[in-house]
Image (cartoon, grey):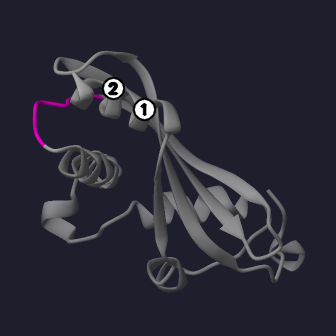
Amino acid sequence: MADAGNFSAVKIGNFIVHVYYRGGSPPETVFVEIVEYARTEDLRTIQVRKHGWAQSVGRQSMALELMELKQGAINHLLPDDTEKTGEAQAWEMIQRRLRQHDIDVTVEELKKIPVVVNIDKELKSLIVKFRAG
């Protein structure tokens, strides 16, 4: 880790959460992996976290299923103590991870950064195929 004098003045533009299909098939459980990145204003992409989970897709409308997957990805990233703290992210962990890449950012600044959730094309295609019957 760099000393305080070597931190970059680069800011984080947004967080990107990618949701990938990793197996299974609707209407049963699908296995999903989520990878969260911080995208800097100088276009570096820094992986912040990576998790997996299983989700039942069910027989609802495709739009609702995709919204559920997006919300499921965001919910999966919530800290374990979110009900007690009300925090939507593990901000200190993200801050430490970014400091490993010489980016100095406060928790207050991190909280203002927008989050974009992208669903993998393969997962979208699987849902469309399932819906088509």
Q: Residue at x 28, y 70 (%)?
A: 87
Answer few, some or many: residues within 10 Å of disc 2's Cα (few below 14, many 20 plus, some between 14 and 19). few
Residue 33, percent from left and from top: 44, 32
| Residue 56 located within the stretch drawn in magenta | yes
Q: Quadrant of the C terminus?
A: top left
Q: Is residue 113 left or right of residue 104?
A: left
- The reply to whether callout 1 and callout 2 are in contact (CB within 8 Å) is yes
Part of the protein shown in magenta: 54-60
Q: Which mark is residue 79?
A: none
Residue furthest to the front: 132
Q: Amino acid at mark 2?
A: Lys
User: In the rendered view, would you say 105 is above or below 49?
Assistant: below
Q: Is residue 55 visible in the rendered structure shown here? A: no
- The label on residue 125 is 1
Q: Quadrant of the N terminus?
A: bottom right
Which residue position holds label 2? 129
- Name the residue: 63% across, 56% down: 97
Query: Which element carries disc 2, helix, strand or loop?
Result: helix
| Tag 1 secondary structure | helix
Give amino acid for label 1. Ser
